[in-house]
Amino acid sequence: MIFHSIATKPVLNRLLDLISQFSITHGTFETNIPFLSLLREVKPTVVEYGFLNPSICIVIQGNKKVIIGEKSIEYGAGNYIASSIDMPIKGQVSKASPETPYTAIRIAFTSEEIASVALEANFKPREENKLREGVFVENIGIEVLLVLERLLNLSSDSQAAAFLAPAMKREIIYHLLTGENGDMFYNNMLLHHEASGISKAIHYVKSNFERSLTVDQIARVGNMSVSTLHHKFKVVTTLTPIQYQKQLRLQEARRILLSGGVNVTGAAFQVGYESLTQFNREYKRLFGLPPLKDIQAIRANFKVKSKGVQ
């Protein structure tokens, strides 16, 4: 999937120059534009579990690999990865160095924003019957890169950014809808998930992950049978509803433990576990280490990375 046209190369270089002006060493940098963040890594990373939030992330330099279910995808400069839901993935930066760091720009979206632009622009996609995964990788068009260049130039002026950035976000959505892969963008980001009711089911699990849920409850929310729910949920998220809930719980527990102030027992109960033994077992199965050792390893790795970019 790694590809970018010759025409995009000068714009990618200009974007790199603009990003270099921000005080970012590694990790994620939040700009003063609420929906715009920057990502940077100076060396390849280990495989990490996480949830990809509804967004589009455009790679400006370097390569990244994601594992979605059984599928592995590597993508790089001129590619973007987009997600219409909170999607469980494994991923790692596969190509980066201090001289040519992995660099990406993330734009957060909502389905309502995409639907609004599609409606006002009278966009009529070619509808497909096939339900797809809630995340996909494609090539970015030069029109989007040019808007991103304007956005980054704008971000130093808070007053102008507050007024102009929302319109520029809509412009990005418009170009994604009307570009070469516009039908795919629309169908993946909006059409099937809304039409099938699966987005309601996913949102329900996400909003109530700490509660004890049954598959019957989730199916009723999506107005579908249990068997249909299982099929559609697995296609879109690569997980069953209960597996999806479990990953939400474990990811949130990990975040709570990293923030400090709560012990393992407190974190387990806070995310809905009733058995500490079960929590420890499932945590280790997902992340490879028991909770305390995992948190210690993450913090140690963060200290090493911080020293390496000073």
Image (cartoon, helix red, strand yellow):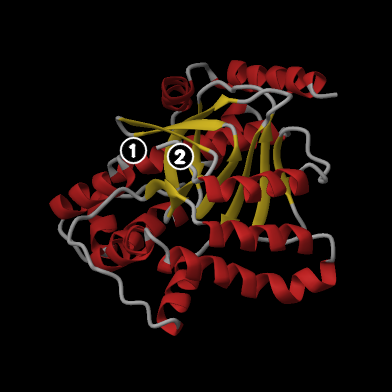
Viewer-nearest residue: 210 or 225 = 225
Viewer-nearest residue: 204 or 19 = 19
Residue at (71% x, 49% y) in the render: 14
The answer to whether residue 77 is visible is yes
- If the image is split into quadrants, where does the C terminus sit? top right
| Relative to 106, residue 274 above or below | above
Q: Position of residue 288 (x, y in %)?
A: 48, 17
Q: In which quadrant of the rendered view does residue 247 lie?
A: top left
The answer to whether residue 262 is visible is no
- In the drawing, what numbered circle is on residue 3? 2
Q: Amino acid at mark 2?
A: Phe
Q: Position of residue 26 (x, y in %)?
A: 73, 33
Viewer-nearest residue: 282 or 30 = 30
Q: Amino acid at mark 1?
A: Gln
Q: CA distance from mark 1 to mark 2?
A: 34 Å
**Left or right: 277 as drawn, with respect to 215:** right
Mark 1 neighbour density, 10 Å: few (under 14) some (14–19) many (20 or more)? few
Q: Earlier in the sequence, mark 1 or mark 2?
A: 2
